[in-house]
Amino acid sequence: MARIVLGMAVPHSGMLGKAPETWFEDGQRDRAKDVLWYRNRTWTYPELERERLSQGFQAPLSLQERRARAQRCWDALDELRRVYREAKPDVAVILGKDQREIFIDTTPSIAIYTGRTIENGPPQRPVYAPPRTLTHDAHPELARYLTEVFERDGFDITEVVRWPPNTWLQSQPVVPHAFGFIYHQIMVDQPPPNVPILMNTFYPPTQPPFRRALAFGKALFKAIQAWSSDKTVAIIASGGLSHFVCDEELDQVFLNAFRNYDFERLAQVDERSYQSGTSEVKLYVPVLVAMQELGCEMNLIDYVPCYRTEAGTGEGFAFMHWNPADGAPRRP
């Protein structure tokens, strides 16, 4: 039977590919937004800046601090690359989301790519892709098996047989950035055969609520465990934590719950907090379910909140992994 050898959660922000001297450029986009999610409601940028005036973002906005935090992020990515390299999985299941990159006229709640090949490359930004287009192997056998199991378990799955053109990128058929980041940054452009699973965390009304994401995670773990194969498998979530408004207090709620596999605490978080980029936390849930079942402890390499405006817009970056091969006992 298949054996899970690695769990990983990786932030995929464009900030991770930019010099900290340029982070304020992203801040200019934040200032122009009419909708910024924070503490269960939406704010305009001026409203948010007034609300968070007393939280003191001048220190983390200094160039010296931005440089220091960027270096911590890059060091953490180096460590994740090392962990992945040592695990050497035969197959990967990657959980990400589409951000109106390929799904324009439809918004499936959960979709699975069952095609044979995956392209990543220009004109995707360098943090997400190599300088020339590369073609990677997908794993249609595992993808179709998972789709059949999920359908039997009561999940309505959208099958993606061929990547639609990426409308962000001049209609090229390259993968959404959530997946490209994993291929390029963690797998160093040499991914194993893999199954991309897209969960619509971003756009109402087809966002799976937290408990639906939890049920999906349990179904995924059971399916991989029952897969009639001798392959080793990595389960990787791409995204999170709080953004595009960085909320360190909320991030600590998430991290403590992850550490203790406290799914009830995560379910108690208001669904209005699982919005915008912060919604990507739901992609972690299938990884957490599998790692709890395998008796693993969370390895948090670093948590780095990175800011780009006086309103506290930016992202909370957490870099974490779980290693079933460390000798943790399997649950009966």
Image (cartoon, rainbow, N blue to C red):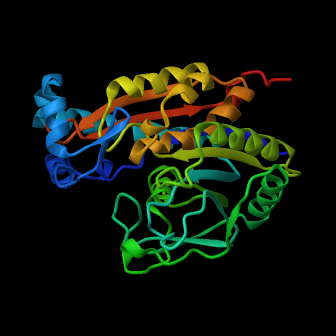
Q: Quadrant of residue 63?
A: top left
Against 8, residue 303 (above or below) is above
Q: In this image, 286 relative to 82: left or right?
A: right
In the rendered image of this protein, does residue 312 appear above or below residue 328? below
Q: Residue at x 79, y 51 (%)?
A: 154
Measuring from the top left, give residue 323's x and y in whole percent.
64, 31
Whether residue 49 sits left or right of residue 215 in the image: it is: left
Residue 301 placement (x, y as % from top left): 44, 28
Q: Say which residue appears at 45% left-offset and 36% top-offset.
A: 79
Q: Quadrant of the C terminus?
A: top right
Q: Residue at x 83, y 54 (%)?
A: 149
From the viewer's side, name the closer residue of 156 and 287: 156
| View extreme (bottom): residue | 171
Q: How many marks?
A: 0
Residue 320 appearing in the image: yes
Q: Position of residue 124 (x, y in %)?
A: 37, 68
Residue 122, image quadrant: bottom left
User: Relative to residue 24, is residue 177 drawn left or right?
Assistant: right
The quarter of the picture where the N terminus appears is: top right
Between residues 72 and 254, which one lies in front from this camera angle? Answer: 254
Residue 10 seen in the current view: no
User: Which residue: 74% across, 28% down?
Assistant: 293
Q: Quadrant location of residue 157?
A: bottom right
Query: Could you say where residue 166 lies in the image, as x and y percent from the top left?
Result: 45, 74
